Amino acid sequence: MLLCSARTIASAWTCFLLAIFGSKLCLLQFPLPLPFSSIKEEKDFDFPIMACIFTITVVVISSVMLILIRLLYVLYQTGKPLKTRGSAGLAPPPLSTLIILGSGGHTAEMLNLLAMLQKDRFSPRFYIAAATDNMSLQKAHLLEETEDKVEGISRSQFMQIYRSREVGQSYITSVLTTLIAIVHALWLMLRIRPQVILCNGPGTCVPLCVIAFLFKVVGIRWSSVFYIESIARVHRLSLSGLLLYKLRIADQFFVQWPQLQRKYPRAHYVGCLM
């Protein structure tokens, strides 16, 4: 997508410059009978304009090239292990982790996965669920309360995010709610800036993961996205999973059925996690 937009911008600037230089050639071949003073004023006036156009062109092309180089670097590094620097002889520092919950089976699968997680390696933990999904956060609270009793300290926070579209909502009004959800997701990501993102299919994970990928490109924060497709997806990916897979946003993509791994070769088959 970014490559297409870069080509479009470069083509537009090329056509613009050709139009300008073409008009100059026409004036040179067929000069108008203007007084000498008018010609001199026109030449004096054209030089700063041309210099400004040239400067803007160089800046735009350089910016596009830098973005493309950075994008290629991010795509190349995507999927590689996250490097954490610890002191000599000591364990690496814990990683701030964002856990995205979804209603129903998504939350049950995620909490079952978190039960096997090394909590001391992934801390602090930030739980996010949709604004209309209170049950998922309550279940996460219960899980963390058990851990807090063992560790004696709380290392988790719970947040809610606006949905882009509710079930049965019209497409016209969903445009506004989608914009609000994107702005809210951006604010949450700027606040959290996680090093690790865990998600397993709810629609709320898409804007958060896309923003995390853009943060990589612009250099704000490098977040590794781990996507675990739901066990309910046997023959094809969910829409959220398909987007993160096709756009190469997920660093590691896991499926729970072997036929999915054969269909999507960049995915990793891990068996049933439930």
Image (cartoon, rainbow, N blue to C red):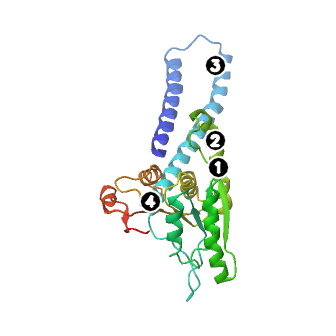
Which one is nearer the viewer's eye here, 150 or 195? 150
Which one is nearer the viewer's eye here, 20 or 212? 212
| Amino acid at the residue labelled 3 | Ile
In the rendered structure, the answer to whether residue 227 lies left or right of residue 185 reads left
In the picture shown, does residue 15 fall above or below 58? above
Which one is nearer the viewer's eye here, 274 or 265? 274
In the rendered structure, the answer to whether residue 249 lies left or right of residue 195 reads left
Q: Which numbered dot is residue 162?
A: 1
Q: Which numbered dot is residue 177?
A: 2
Identify residue for label 4. Answer: 230
In the rendered structure, the answer to whether residue 36 lies left or right of residue 57 reads right
Tell me how far mark 4 sits from mark 2, CA to CA: 26 Å
**Looking at the image, is mark 1 or mark 4 earlier in the sequence?**
1
Which one is nearer the viewer's eye here, 120 or 56? 120
Where residue 221 sits in the image (x, y, percent)? 60, 62
Where residue 189 sits in the image (x, y, percent)? 64, 58
Instruction: Sort mark 2 into few (<14), some (14-19) or many (20+) by Cα contacts within 10 Å.
Output: some
| Amino acid at the residue labelled 1 | Tyr
Q: Secondary structure at mark 3?
A: helix
Residue lying at 57% horizontally and 64% vertically, measured from the top left: 99
Contact (CB < 8 A) between labels 2 and 1? Answer: yes
